[in-house]
Amino acid sequence: MKNIYSLMATMMILTGCATEKQHLFTIENDEISVEVSSVGAELKSLKTRANGLEYLWQANPNYWPRSSPLLFPVIGTSFMDSYLHEGLEYSMPQHGFARDYDWKCLYQQQDSMSFELRASAETQQLYPFDFVLQVNYTIEKSRLRVHYQVRNEGKTVMPFAIGGHPGFKCPLKEKESRSSYSLVFEQKESLYRYYLTGAEPDSALFLNNQKRIAISNHLFESGAIILKHLRSSWVGLQNPDGNIYLKMNIEHFPYFAIWTKAEDDAHFICLEPWQALPGTRKSLQQISDKEGAILLAPQDSFLTMYEIEI
């Protein structure tokens, strides 16, 4: 039977009751500026200083009302938006709850800032573990590094997933079309994309010894492109002139997703480094059984990072 308090906590998140009014924090150097919200510790702006050009999607609610949510303690959608743990059924919204809570800013310096979210009575109705989650943003020249640290302060093993979901402007400039842009991989890849939208997982060939693929609506008609174990350490976005205007280093993540809406006017694309996969949509699943789930020992910490260069 589903934990009624878990269901109530989920409803609070979905109706916005978990969040407070956001506060914005900024760091900058001679080349780039970065803005982060206290709500979800979400990246809200990534600009070049020379011309003020914005690279991050600005959360147009007509298409996608977020910019760069942090995914924790699950990724994606689970069967009936629920999971099992020790005989109990818990509610869990898509991509978890961390993106909807107000985080504490631990510090803000000229070139870095750090945020923290700790377990509470409310989060434990959704996720019965004593976690401490921190995200650190650091800039160096034209690079932004995003570090995640998860600590298990409980007495039992803590299963979780974590990942990034930054959305970037695509096309970058007005009067260009998204279909004139491409995804570029560091190395030639032969990869299958994995579909998790049906009752059973499925796959289809996505890249066949290729380094580049044009962005099209057709690619996203079945949802996100989910890839496993890339050879490439980075993935980039290429403009119509053939220039790679953005690179994301994903070498510390075993899974990678690419998503946008299959609509011409949806001028964004998300590059998503994941540490684990969503659950199946066939039946309720133990949270620890999801592919790639990290099983963190008591009093232990998990660290990972990705990098964006513009």
Image: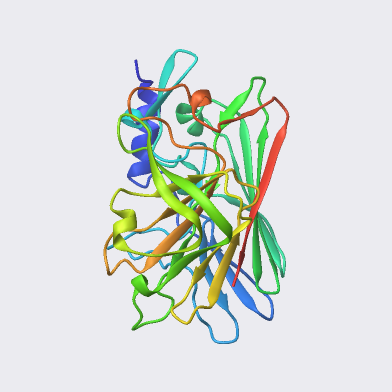
Q: Residue at x 46, y 53 (%)?
A: 207
Nearer the observer, 21 or 266 = 266
The x, y position of residue 81, in whole percent, is 35, 32
Q: Tag count in the figure?
A: 0
Q: Residue at x 64, y 38 (%)?
A: 132
Is 247 left or right of 96, judged from the image as shown?
right
Q: In which quarter of the image is residue 108?
A: bottom right
Can you say whether 184 is above or below 273 in the image? Answer: below
> In this rendering, does residue 305 appear at all?
yes
Is 223 left or right of 278, judged from the image as shown?
left
Nearer the observer, 79 or 134 = 79
Is 268 left or right of 295, judged from the image as shown?
left
Q: Quadrant of residue 82?
A: top left
The residue at the far front in this view is 209
Q: Which residue is drawn at 68% across and 29% down?
A: 153
Q: Which residue is drawn at 59% across and 69% down?
A: 34
The x, y position of residue 56, in whole percent, is 48, 68
Is 188 left or right of 220, judged from the image as shown?
right
Quarter of the rendering occupied by the N terminus: top left
The x, y position of residue 273, in whole percent, is 54, 50
The residue at the far top in this view is 87
Quarter of the rendering occupied by the C terminus: bottom right
Can you say whether 91 is above or below 61 in the image? Answer: above
